[in-house]
Image (cartoon, rainbow, N blue to C red):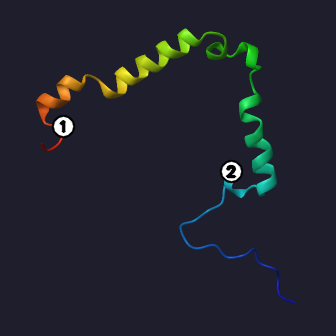
Amino acid sequence: MAEAKPPARPSGVSKRGFASMDPERQRAIARKGGASVPSEKRSFSQDRALAAQAGRKGGEASHGSRQAETTTGAAGPK
């Protein structure tokens, strides 16, 4: 009798790590993601002002100054 072979995959594609798990196991692991820290210990859930400050800081870092964009032509055509 012939040996049973695993199903063939397209070349260049490998199912390793998370992708190789069955969907139910993936869901079980993903479900735990938000539950790693109790809600009372999450700093932003305790202090809305701190959360707002962090969001503002992130926006400044990623977007920078709108004035600088207009002087370099990044604003687009007029």
Amino acid type, mark 2: Gly
Report if the CB atoms under discs 2 and 1 are less than 8 Å apart. Answer: no
Residue under the point 68% across and 51% down: 17
Q: Quadrant of residue 21?
A: bottom right
Residue at which label 1 appears: 74
Q: Is residue 64 above or below residue 3?
A: above
Q: Is residue 21 left or right of residue 72?
A: right
Amino acid type, mark 1: Ala
Residue under the point 57% across and 65% down: 13
Residue 75 screen position, x and y as percent? 19, 37
Residue 67 screen position, x and y as percent? 19, 23
Residue 78 screen position, x and y as percent? 12, 42
Q: How many marks?
A: 2
Residue under the point 75% across and 14% down: 40
Pick the front one: 5 or 60: 60
Q: Is residue 70 above or below residue 16?
A: above
Q: Secondary structure at mark 2?
A: helix
Q: Secondary structure at mark 1?
A: loop
Q: Is residue 73 left or right of residue 27?
A: left
Q: Is residue 69 left or right of residue 46?
A: left
Q: Sort mark 2 into few (<14), some (14-19) or many (20+) by Cα contacts within 10 Å.
A: few
Q: Is residue 36 above or below residue 45?
A: below
Pick the front one: 33 or 47: 47
Pick the front one: 70 or 17: 70
Q: Quadrant of residue 69?
A: top left
Residue at which label 2 appears: 17
Q: Sort mark 1 into few (<14), some (14-19) or many (20+) by Cα contacts within 10 Å.
A: few
Q: Is residue 71 above or below residue 29?
A: above
Which mark, residue 34? none
Residue under the point 72% across and 31% down: 34
Q: Identify the residue at the far front of this view.
A: 78
